Amino acid sequence: MIDPSEARTRIVSGLPLMGTETVSLTEAAGRITATAVLARLSNPPADVSAMDGYAVRAADTTEGAELRVTGEAPAGHPPDQTVTPGTCVRLFTGSVMPAGADAVLIQENTLRNGDCITVTQPVSPGRFIRPYGQDFTAGLPVIPAGKRLSARDIGLAAAANCPWITARRRPRVAILSTGDEIVMPGDNVPPGSIIGSAAFMLSALLKEAGADPVILPVARDSTGDIRQATSGLATVDMLLTIGGASVGDYDLVKAALGEAGLVTDFWKIAMRPGKPLMFGHLDATPVIGLPGNPVAVFVCAIVFVLPALRKMTGETTPDNGPEKARLTCDLPANDLRFDHLRATLKRDEAGTLIATPFSKQDSGMMNPLAACDALILRAAHAPAARTGDVCDIIRFGRRDD
Ligand SMILES: Nc1nc2c(c(=O)[nH]1)N[C@H]1C(S)=C(S)[C@@H](COP(=O)(O)OP(=O)(O)OC[C@H]3O[C@@H](n4cnc5c(N)ncnc54)[C@H](O)[C@@H]3O)O[C@H]1N2
Ligand code: MOO
């Protein structure tokens, strides 16, 4: 058994970078930029007013001064007049500043009388002007390459007049559930069957991570069926199998794919859940054989598949690396398998994160998996931990959009 960090390195290191494609802004959320997005204009594109009021020369705005209004310049209609001493131009939020003005006097600080205003409160130079290019400058990058595009990034790209993004192609990932007992959600459930929930969870996770998953029909526990299901996969970028990875008489994935030419890199890792994980290549396609227990599927996906996708898409957005929390209970010393305990999180009165592991950590239980907020990480051979000790956690449910 190899340790999980070595397994991750061996999976990730040889993976190729996906090609690129052009994606419209409305389809770009969650995609990874392949090149930097360069602003195609500056923002603001000119000095503009931040308020409704008058373009003035600040020096003219002594209390009680009268200024003549020489015209108006609504947003979208740049002014052609110049503000000269003793005059002003009527402006609105977003209006381009006229030449000669160096401040915006908000209308609340004036009294209007026909073509004149009386200043009721002076304004200082530069006040309420959004200067040209203060947000970003034409020709310069607004979004780096390798960034996962959030809703805010989409807004920024749109503001920068970029309707198209050059993105990494989404890795196509085939998901193959195996097992005579597996039926699809909504199917009849003959005695002894269970629902193949893991494929749906995995597909959702991969979609969220920017991949293009496809769920294949379930393969029965026979080498022929598994081989058949995995033929013709030349167009996928990765194959994930579920189940049949362990040592039982009907755990046939490794043998079946071996007949099809699988070159195994490793099988079995010192990790819980996820011990029988397998990695290899079928022709050029990377294959990760995930254990059947659905919690093992999820944890292995977090620990191995998501980093694999990051490598393939060139994603450099920082991931949610381990954080710290305090334990609310004692934990026994760990054995040789790096452990991932499903846990809930709360904050104590001091605002510190506190983690409570579920009392049952069975890797077949979906309910605590769905309810947990984090995985508590327990290194191989970690000594016993006491209530209040600090532990590493991987936290879920933190979105950046
Ligand atoms: N003698 C040993 N037995 C087992 C070992 C071991 O080292 N020695 N390892 C255990 C560990 S750890 C795991 S994890 C499991 C994984 O076994 P397999 O990958 O062969 O998985 P299956 O036997 O096919 O299934 C395990 C379990 O999960 C259910 N399952 C399978 N596919 C799905 C799916 N798509 N969705 C939901 N649930 C699924 C299946 O019905 C089984 O209950 O092996 C242990 N045994
Ligand atoms: O490693 Mo298995 O995944 O403990 O259940």
Image (spheres, helix red, strand yellow):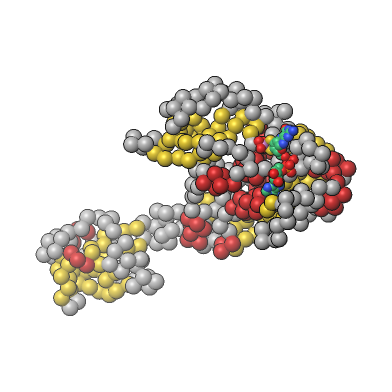
Q: Residue at x 45, y 54 (%)?
A: 136
Q: Residue at x 56, y 47 (%)?
A: 367
Q: How many marks?
A: 0
Image location (x, y in percent) of residue 41: 49, 60
Image position of 88 with respect to 19: above or below: below
Image position of 319 with respect to 125: above or below: above
Image position of 77 with respect to 41: above or below: below
Task: Pick the residue in front: 214 or 57.
Answer: 214
Direction front: furthest residue: 191
Q: Quadrant of residue 207?
A: bottom right
Direction left: furthest residue: 64
Image location (x, y in percent) of residue 350: 34, 35
Q: Is residue 203 left or right of residue 49?
A: right
State whether residue 260 appears in this view: yes
Task: Pick the residue in front: 126 or 100.
Answer: 126
State whether residue 307 appears in this view: no
Image location (x, y in percent) of residue 61: 17, 61
Image position of 250 with respect to 203: above or below: above
Task: Pick the residue in front: 187 or 267.
Answer: 187
Direction bottom: furthest residue: 114
Q: Residue at x 43, y 58 (%)?
A: 43
Image location (x, y in percent) of residue 95: 34, 67
Q: Quadrant of the N terminus?
A: top right
Q: Is residue 104 left or right of residue 378?
A: left
Q: Quadrant of residue 341?
A: top right
Q: Quadrant of ligand 2?
A: top right
Q: Residue at x 42, y 36 (%)?
A: 353
Q: Is residue 126 left or right of residue 39?
A: left
Q: Quadrant of residue 369?
A: top right
